[in-house]
Image (tube, rainbow, N blue to C red):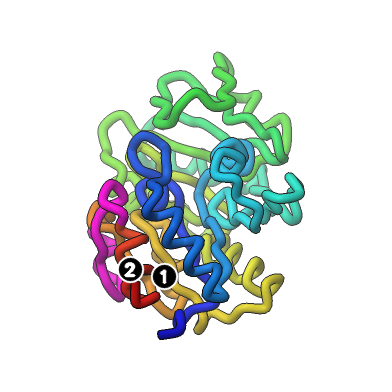
Amino acid sequence: MSFPYRLVATDLDGTLLRGDGTVSERTREALVAATAAGAAHIIVTGRSVAWTRHILDDLEYQGLAVCGQGAQLYDAGAHRLLTSVTLDRQLAGLALAKIESEMGPVALAASRDGLDGEVLVGPGYRVQEGPLPHVFLKDTTQVWAAPLNKLYIQHPELDDDALTQAARQVVGSLVDIVMAGPGVVEILPLGLSKATGLSLAARRLRVKAAETIAFGDMPNDIPMFAWSAHGVAMANAHRELKAVADETTTSNEEDGIAVVLERLLGA
């Protein structure tokens, strides 16, 4: 039985990575077998390059990675940023002002552009991820001092889903709002998604959407599933992603990617 896809696209957090930040040996072996069968593996993550590089190095990953919710295309083998889309800061400031005028103050963080782009964290923002390059700000006006990939917002009362929906209603014509994980609601350039980044990477690899299988766990993976021929949600996935997935596998803790790839490989 030949492997039916030429591209395997995997999200990182909650999908390829287990809760402890590692990739199981079974999943590694399944991905190696898929690539041996002729498929390329590409990581597609909401994390910016600065927050992804150390993981890729630990995995000894040499391929392309779509980072920053589709904003950045990174060559892991060459440690080189190939393309990067930045958020219009004037437009983002307007969107933020409109959100706060309708919903009250939000806690703010931002991802700076570039290979070493720090995450700037304003007062009251609850950091969700580990010991990565944060810069804590007393004055959020510093956020606007250099090019950005995205903003992060948190609301003192609304949960992630409610904040995402409300913000979209207020500024959805100016910017994109996505929920990328627990406590992670992002403001992105309008029209940017994992699908736009993945399609760019696929063109470089001379692979078509019809030849792609994608794995994910959060609503920010919905465009990637829509672009790919087959979308696989993890058992731990958000209900919105499961609703549009072609199938649901086991969780990231239970080798969900390997379960599907092994079946497709006839292992």
Q: CA distance from mark 2 to mark 1?
A: 15 Å
Mark 2 / mark 1, whichever is N-terminal: 1
Q: Residue at x 36, y 60 (%)?
A: 257
Q: Is residue 115 left or right of residue 125?
A: right
Most extreme residue toward the top is 138
Q: Circle 1 sits on which residue?
A: 225
Q: Residue at x 54, y 53 (%)?
A: 69
Q: Nearer the viewer, residue 123 or 71?
A: 71
**Residue 194 visible in the current orientation:** yes
**Residue 180 visible in the current orientation:** no
Q: Residue at x 34, y 34 (%)?
A: 155
Q: Amino acid at mark 2?
A: Val
Q: Which quarter shows the N terminus?
A: bottom left
Q: Position of residue 37 (x, y in %)?
A: 52, 75
Position of 159 relative to 214 (above/below): above
Is 207 magenta? The answer is: no
Q: Position of residue 198 (x, y in %)?
A: 58, 66
The kind of secondary structure element at disc 2 is helix
Res. 249 image quadrant: bottom left
Q: Nearer the viewer, residue 171 or 152?
A: 152
Q: Is residue 172 left or right of residue 70?
A: left
Would you call the spot at circle 1 few (<14 residues within 10 Å), some (14-19), or many (20 or more)?
Answer: many
Q: Nearer the viewer, residue 60 or 217?
A: 60
Q: Is residue 81 left or right of residue 226?
A: right
Q: Amino acid at mark 1?
A: Phe
Q: Position of residue 156 (x, y in %)?
A: 31, 29
Q: What are the residue bounds of the magenta stretch?
A: 239-255
Q: Circle 2 sits on which residue?
A: 260
Q: Which quarter shows the C terminus?
A: bottom left
